[in-house]
Image (cartoon, rainbow, N blue to C red):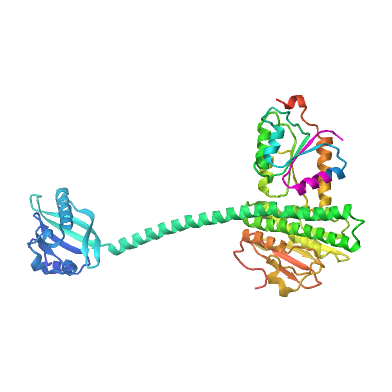
Amino acid sequence: MNDGTILLVEDSPDDVLFTLRAFERNQFSNEVVVAVDGEQALEYLLPADGREPLRPALILLDVNLPKIDGLEVLRRIRANSRTAGLPVVVLTTSREERDIVDSYRLGANSFVRKPVVFGEFVDATQALGMYWLLVNEPVPPWRGEG
Amino acid sequence: MTVSAHGAVQPEQLMALLDHTSAVIYMRGLDGRYLLVNHEYERLFDVRREDIVGLTDHDLFPAEVADSFRANDLMAIAEGRPVRMEETAPGDTGLRTYITVKFPLMDAEQRPYAICGISTDITERKNAEEEVRRLNEELEERVVQRTAELEATTRELDAFAYSVSHDLRAPLRSLAGFSEILLEDYAEVIDEVGRGYLARIEANAARMARMIDDLLDLSRATRAELRRERVDLSALAREVVEELREAEPGRQATVEIADGLTANGDSHLVRLVLLNLIGNAWKFTAREAAAVIRIDALPRQHPPVFAVRDNGAGFDMRYAAKLFDPFQRSHSSSDFEGTGIGLAIVHRIVQRHGGRVWAQSEPGQGATFFFTLAVDRGRRTAREPA
């Protein structure tokens, strides 16, 4: 499996646990970095203090987040040339049309609704990982830095 | 008296004419002194004509009223022709409004020597107009207010539905997720009965998630803006059936969909109607050896009456009226899985299109659901119960 890092932006500890378990179940060995709110996610991706920025192979982004919400995080990722090319999958509880429309409008690569039943959650995670970490060709790093 | 009559017409006859009109009529000299008033004038201001001759308006009315009458007199005299104006004068029940025509009388050299006035009371009309204007204003204000209230309610409802879709589902995922984890990781320390309970927790969490989705559909069917377009119901029905077959590949069912079923409606919402009605037909024919579902339209109906028919479990017509209320279920959940919201969604959507939905069934004899998507301006269909 690809050794790219996955950035999981998720404030619910239960959902973090389920997502990690689903990765494990699908034998994804990728390192997973968890950000528990939008602010932390942006600190990883666009650090203000000169630290090495995180360049994940995939960002899994929840919509409802404390401090800075998911859609605002997405907007800032797309607005910055250094992060604009990163694949972002909005992974959320809601099926509200508004969230789906706004996510795509702001440049999400995909919108996935977290299934309630764990088995379906594992299947969805597998499909996601297979596609974004194996099938998909990301923006080459030397082009993504703008 | 300057009034003269020609031929057979006598001054008394002319005076009688003046006295029997509802208008107030008067004649004043250039100096403003009264020369003549009619009966209506006497009645209105409670004076006798013999007493008033020689007086001016300043002897009869408050100064500002008299001043304005005098100004109008002088204006008409200066114009040298009839002039129309609005005047107000005090009456028994407050100020009254008149439409007045004033014109000067001219002598042989075309010099004015007197001024005549004919005043018609328009107070009632004026009040009525004012009332209409006030009512209109009030109505407009109320419409603005109600619209704002409605918008606020819709916004609240939106926010509520949004919060429900996010916050109510998340805990369910935890319930179902941890039940599953217990089943997987602790299978050896939980016995058969315990595992059964965990499975039930999971099944119920999943069921509640479906109910939340259905409630959101119901709320969306109410809130969403109706976007009418030409809708191909035959194509939508085929899509829905395809989905049902994919979700349950083992099911044997004959589905017949009539071609050319079209209507003017919101395709997203009409799809929800078909999804629920065909979904029900699919569900309630699960135990039929030879399940048959038919989607067609009644012949020669305007607007078209669409029908979804099945040969499944059916229902007792005694409960038909309650069928379209939310959370009403005609079968126990152990018989047929369901949230009891589907038909409420159908009802809401059909209603928003101005149409109707009704059903025909007998237990064990299958069921047919009829619906229209437009206002029926003419006859009613024979099948609809009164």
Comparing B52 with B185, the one in front is B185
Return the x and y of residue A14 as percentages of the image width and height: 77, 49
Task: Determine which quarter of the picture holds residue B249.
Answer: bottom right
Comparing A90 with B384, the one in front is A90
Residue farthest bottom in this picture: B318
Return the x and y of residue B318 as percentages of the image width and height: 72, 75
Figure check: B339 above or below A21: below
Magenta stretch: residue B313 in it?
no
Comparing B283 with B294, the one in front is B283
Residue B190 appears in the rendering: yes
Boundaries of the magenta span: A1-21
Return the x and y of residue B291 as percentages of the image width and height: 85, 64
Residue B293 appears in the rendering: no
Residue farthest right in this picture: B188
Task: Determine which quarter of the picture holds residue B68.
Answer: bottom left
Q: Quadrant of the N terminus of chain B?
A: bottom left
- Which residue does the image show at 69% across and 58% down from the upper left? B215
Q: Is residue A101 left or right of residue A8?
A: left
